[in-house]
Structure formats: C-alpha cells, structure tokens
C-alpha cells in the first residue's frame, strides 16, 4: 500500500470513528469522542463485577451494613448526572483502604476504608467521588484515548462491534482502580463528589477532611490506599485545597445547615472487622499466622506486608528486596527436591546451588537461583520449598543480582522462621474489631490501647482512625472508635 492510500485509510477510520463515536458526556454536557456505547459500558461492568468482587475478598458479611451503605448511595444517585443507571453499592471484605467504581453503576468500598471514615458525610463524599467516575465515563474516556493510537484495534471496534473488549478493558480498569485516572479526571471526580454529596444534604467539607485522614495515614505509617490520592504529595495537597475551595461555594439544598451524621455512622460500624480476616491469615506486627493452615512466617521488621488472596508479599521499605509466599496443593506425593524442581521450572529460573534440609521439623529444599524480572532486570532468588502434608509452600526472597549478598540475611531469616503452630495457637487467632468507646476523664491514647488489649505503639493507629493527632485526645464524653482484640 502506498503512503497516500495508507494515510487515507487511517483518515477514513478516524473520520468514521468520530462520526460513530461522538456522545454527550452526562457530567459535563460536552460532546466527546468515545469508542464504546453505553450498552457496551454497562455490559463490561456487569461481566467484571463478580470477578472484581471476588478479587477483593467477596462481600463483607452483614446485611445491615450493606443496606446502610446502599441507602447512602441511592441518596447520591437521586441527585447525580446519570440517575437512569441501576447503581449497586457494596462493601467488600478487604483489608485495603480503597473504594472504586466499575462502568455501568457498580460502586465498592472496602471494610478497611469504613474503619477510617468518621461520619456518614465523609462516606458520602467518597461514594460521590466514585459515582463521579461513572457519570463522567472516565474509564471509557481513558480507554478511548489509549485505543486511538492502535489503528488496527480501532478499525475492528468500528466495523466489528461484536468483538469483545473485556480483556483489554479489564486490564486497563484494574490499573485505574489501583492508580487512579490521572490528575484531571481525579480532580473532576472530587468536584462531582462534592456536588452530589452536598446536593444530598451532606457537609461538603467532609470530602477534604477524609483526604487529610488518608494523607496522615500515608505520612505516618507509609500505608497507601484509595486509588489516585497518593500519586504525589503535591497533587494530594492540591486536591485538598481545591476541594475546600469548592466547598466554600456550596449552599445547603434545604434548611440552613449540612449534615455530618457522625454518631449515626459510628453506631453502624460498631463490630466491623479491622485488618486481616483470619480466614485469609492474619499479620500482627511482622508475623503472618494462618489458623486453618496452622502455619507461621516472620518477616523482617519494618517491611511492608501485603496479605493478598493468592500471594503473601513483603517489601523492604527502601530497596528492591521482596519476599513472597505462595501455596500449592499437591496431587501426588513429592519429595522436597522434586517440589523445588517444579517451582524452578514454573518461574523459569536457573539453579545455582541447592540442598535438601529440615526447617523446624519440616522437609524442605533450600536453593539459590538466577533469573530475570521485569522492572528489576537480572535477579537472584533464595527459595525455600517446604512440604506440609499435601501442601507445598514456596517462600522466595528476590533482589537485584548486584545486591543479593546484602539481602540474603533477610531472606534466610524469613525462610527459616516458617513453622507449624498448634491447634491451641490456631484457635487463639481472632480478628480485630472496631468498637465504640466513650472517652473518660484521665484517658490517654496509651491507656485506651492497654484497656483494649493492644500494644502501646498501637496508640498511633487509634488516633489515626479517629482523625486525631496522637498528641491530642478528644474531650471526655466523646465517642470514638477503638480496636478490640477478638472483638470484645
């Protein structure tokens, strides 16, 4: 094909796509070029919802809390820019601080986010932000922007609309859930969140107040969450300032005041599970314990630990050192050496050395391997392949090859900490629960933590979940959230 014909074809595709793909954005009223119809958008959300829901731990048990969150959501739907969609609001059983939306009207908040929210108005602001992503069609717009650079896919989407976009769109949307939709779209969602929540009668300043809570969590603990907020500190500050400026221009829809509904909210989350759910294993300090599997693994102090559904991962606070543990259910009896070979093959590593060993009475194989990982480059790995009845555990430490010797002591101590725990120890693993406590005269954060069976250094966590400075305590008589061991 000569250049003229080639560019003519591209021009034809783009012209047709513009004609066929223009739609009015419900949130802005502007005509925009998109590569997905509303019916396709709704269908993709419908297909993705059960998969995403399961990935985030499934629905949190408790119909009362689910109904409460749905009622707030439906108040916001009544005043949003796309009220004709069927919106579904769910709480998922995840220890991550997050909230996210899928195209077509699916909005999720994690139970851990609810633990850090301090009023119904703050929750309405979060949910309004997520509804804003749906009403402004941010996922569809971002996807369209990416696809306009891929002419072959573009042509296929125009001339063969039955071709499924779910696979590519799912990958894109998963990234957006984690990282956000970019500065411009996140700022727009903030504005829409304020618009919808204030129109429903909620205090518009609660949007910026919750952002400040999340910012304090990040700065104090390094625990990141809620997509899009922590891409950079200057951007976070900008969003807080702009949200406060936006709130100044809002007036109550009726009456002479906005609602925060703090006490009502606290009553609804009394008994909420906090942190890890024991059915997925529990991380206390730097130690992971699983009551059903009856295993324990101790990570290095200060490492960030993520207890995922399929994999347990810890990362050094500053360096590219990682330790992960995965579980394999074995169909046939294997020696530790045979299991180690399967692990080596599955990762495509080359073995440098290795030997069968016993770790805390368990049959194991310890090996050192070489390989390559995307974003890191040449790596070395220290792997403990450990057998426990019909299960094989892979405890793997990974670092760049150049710093492997420095990282090795971390990897060795973690692998060697793997052990089984007794039935009695397993039975004693209980979930943490949010309870509501009334501050008494003479209370301090440390005395309250001691009273509820927590460690002294967890006083900071109590202050954070209540949006207080650890140096200050609410006045006596104030109801606050506390974390109770075992839910008592």
Image (spheres, grey):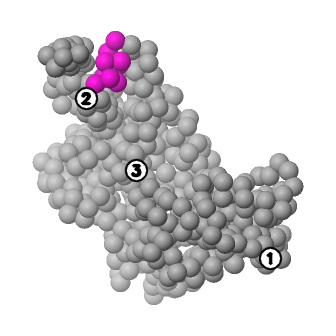
- Kindly identify which residue carries mark 3: 178
Residue 251 x %, y %: 16, 45
Does residue 482 appear in the picture of this structure? yes
- Kindly identify which residue carries mark 1: 358
What secondary structure is marked by label 2?
loop
Residue drawn at (56%, 65%), measured in percent from left and top?
A: 370
Q: Nearer the viewer, mark 1 or mark 3?
A: 1
Q: Nearer the viewer, mark 3 or mark 2?
A: 2
Separation (CA) of disc 2 from disc 1: 56 Å
The verdict on residue 153 being magenta is yes
Does residue 79 appear in the picture of this structure? no
Residue drawn at (45%, 36%), measured in percent from left and top?
A: 170
The answer to whether the residue labelled 2 contacts the one labelled 1, judged by CB atoms less than 8 Å apart, is no
Kindly report the secondary structure that dominates the magenta region of the rendered protein: helix
Residue 453 x %, y %: 61, 79
Of pointers 3 and 2, the one earlier in the residue sequence? 2
Stretch in magenta: 151-159
Of pointers 1 and 3, the one earlier in the residue sequence? 3
| Above or below for 299 versus 277 | below
Separation (CA) of disc 3 from disc 2: 23 Å
View extreme (bottom): residue: 442
Left or right placement of residue 351 versus residue 89 in this view: right
For the N terminus, give its image quadrant. Answer: top left
The answer to whether the residue labelled 1 contacts the one labelled 3, judged by CB atoms less than 8 Å apart, is no
Residue 247 x %, y %: 18, 51
What secondary structure is marked by label 3?
helix
- Kindly identify which residue carries mark 2: 148
Q: For mark 3, does the 10 Å Cα neighbourhood hold few (<14), some (14 to 19), or many (20 or more) residues?
A: some
What secondary structure is marked by label 1?
strand
């Amino acid at each position: 094909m000569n250049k003229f014909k080639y560019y003519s074809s591209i021009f034809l595709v783009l012209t047709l796509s513009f004609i066929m793909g223009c739609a009015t954005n419900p949130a802005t009223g502007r005509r925009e070029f998109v590569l997905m119809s509303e019916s396709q958008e709704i269908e993709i959300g419908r297909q993705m919802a059960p998969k995403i829901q399961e990935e985030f731990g499934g629905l949190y048990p408790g119909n009362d809390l689910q109904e409460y969150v749905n009622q707030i959501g439906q108040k916001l739907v009544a005043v949003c820019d796309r009220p004709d969609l069927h919106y579904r609001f769910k709480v998922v059983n995840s220890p991550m601080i997050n909230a996210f939306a899928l195209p077509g009207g699916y909005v999720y908040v994690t139970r851990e986010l609810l633990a850090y929210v301090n009023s119904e108005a703050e929750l309405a602001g979060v949910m309004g932000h997520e509804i804003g992503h749906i009403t402004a069609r941010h996922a569809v717009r971002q996807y369209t922007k990416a696809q306009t650079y891929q002419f072959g896919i573009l042509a296929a989407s125009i001339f063969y609309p039955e071709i499924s976009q779910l696979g590519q769109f799912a990958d894109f949307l998963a990234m957006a859930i984690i990282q956000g939709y970019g500065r411009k779209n996140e700022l727009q969602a903030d504005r829409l969140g304020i618009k919808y929540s204030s129109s429903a009668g909620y205090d518009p300043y609660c949007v910026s107040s919750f952002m400040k809570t999340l910012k304090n969590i990040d700065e104090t603990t390094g625990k990141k969450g809620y997509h899009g907020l922590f891409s950079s500190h200057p951007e976070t500050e900008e969003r807080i300032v702009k949200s406060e400026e936006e709130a100044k221009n809002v007036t109550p829809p009726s009456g002479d005041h906005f609602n925060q509904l703090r006490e009502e909210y606290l009553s609804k989350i009394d008994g909420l599970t906090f942190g890890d759910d024991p059915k997925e294993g529990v991380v206390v300090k730097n130690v992971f314990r699983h009551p059903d599997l009856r295993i324990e693994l101790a990570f290095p102090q200060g490492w960030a630990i993520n207890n995922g559904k399929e994999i347990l991962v810890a990362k050094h606070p500053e360096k590219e050192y990682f330790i992960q543990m995965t579980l394999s259910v074995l169909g046939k009896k294997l020696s530790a050496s045979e299991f180690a070979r399967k692990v080596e093959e599955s990762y495509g590593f080359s073995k440098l050395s290795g030997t069968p060993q016993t770790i805390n009475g368990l049959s194991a194989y310890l090996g050192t391997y070489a390989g390559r990982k995307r974003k890191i480059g040449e790596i070395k790995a220290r792997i403990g392949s450990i057998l426990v009845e019909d299960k094989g555990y892979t405890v793997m430490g990974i670092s760049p090859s150049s710093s492997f010797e420095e990282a090795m002591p971390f990897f060795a101590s973690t692998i060697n900490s793997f052990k089984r725990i007794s039935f009695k120890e397993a039975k004693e693993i209980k979930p943490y629960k949010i309870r509501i406590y009334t501050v008494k005269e003479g209370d301090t954060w440390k005395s309250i933590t001691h009273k509820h069976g927590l460690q002294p250094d967890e006083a900071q966590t109590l202050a954070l979940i209540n949006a207080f400075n650890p140096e200050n305590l609410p006045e006596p008589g104030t109801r606050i959230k506390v974390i109770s061991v075992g839910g008592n």
